[in-house]
Amino acid sequence: MVQISQVSTLRTAVIPRTTIVTQISLILTGTVFLAIMAQISFPIPGSPVPFTGQTLGVLLLGTAYGASLGFSTMAFYLLMGVLGAPIFSSGSHGLERIAGATGGYLVGMLISTLVLGALAGRKWDQRIKTVIPTMLIGNAIIFSIGLIWLHQYTGQNWAWVFEKGFTPFIFGEILKIAIASTALPVVWRFVSKR
């Protein structure tokens, strides 16, 4: 029996020992999860960036999997999408998704999984007072890189970039942060009781 105080992420609490087969299974499962979350997609009028469930998927996956496995899973997801699997938002795929207007958000998600996983490794995802800042940091990384990329790609002024690439998403992101910040401590309490 593994003591909860000895583990650092939900993945290590639930699956303390992993083999290469377990790791591959987790990467594939995580990739499917991210692909499903990406299909929760709504276009924003006048914006090249859709609203998706993908950021919620990244927040949950990055913290649950930890830095290494979370980063590997997100990298695999991006690779599969670039190679033609229809797993990006609205079933899209291809290199143009990474190189295009929304590419910065995807790259931000990759970096965010690493940071979220590192913070979860320090048990920041186990209590409400630390999980909320963790989710805010993860979202800040995604949107910072996404907005810089969108600005460079479109050549539009910063007011346009914030109006089309950030402002329409504020309420949705607050909701996603609330969901992740509530779910993770609850799951930890359940795992701790086991």
Image (cartoon, helix red, strand yellow):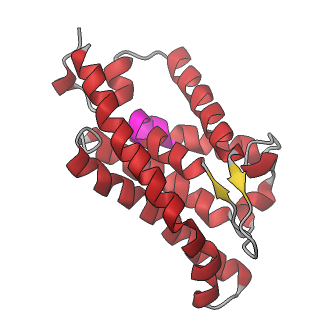
In the image, residue 91 above or below residue 48: above
In the image, residue 144 above or below residue 188: below
Q: Considering depth in this image, is 184 or 75 the residue closer to the camera?
A: 184
Position of 93 with respect to 65 (left or right) is right
Q: Is residue 31 visible?
A: yes
Main SS type for the magenta part? helix
Q: Please state, as top left, top right, bottom left or bottom right, where the N terminus lies in the image.
A: top left
Q: Please state, as top left, top right, bottom left or bottom right, where the C terminus lies in the image.
A: top left
Quarter holding residue 120: top left
Residue sitting at x 80%, y 39%: 85
Indicate yes or no whether the magenta region holds residue 175.
no
Residue sitting at x 76%, y 76%: 46
Q: How many marks?
A: 0
Residue 54: x, y in percent? 60, 49
Quarter holding residue 192: top left
Q: Which residues are magenta?
A: 63-71
Q: Considering depth in this image, is 1 or 41 the residue closer to the camera?
A: 41
Indicate yes or no whether the magenta region holds residue 65.
yes
Q: Is residue 166 visible?
A: no
Residue sitting at x 57%, y 80%: 162
Residue 29: x, y in percent? 59, 26
In the image, residue 134 above or below residue 154: above
In the image, residue 17 above or below residue 171: above
Position of 89 with respect to 147 (left or right) is right
Residue 178: x, y in percent? 39, 50
Residue sitting at x 58%, y 59%: 107
Residue 18: x, y in percent? 43, 17
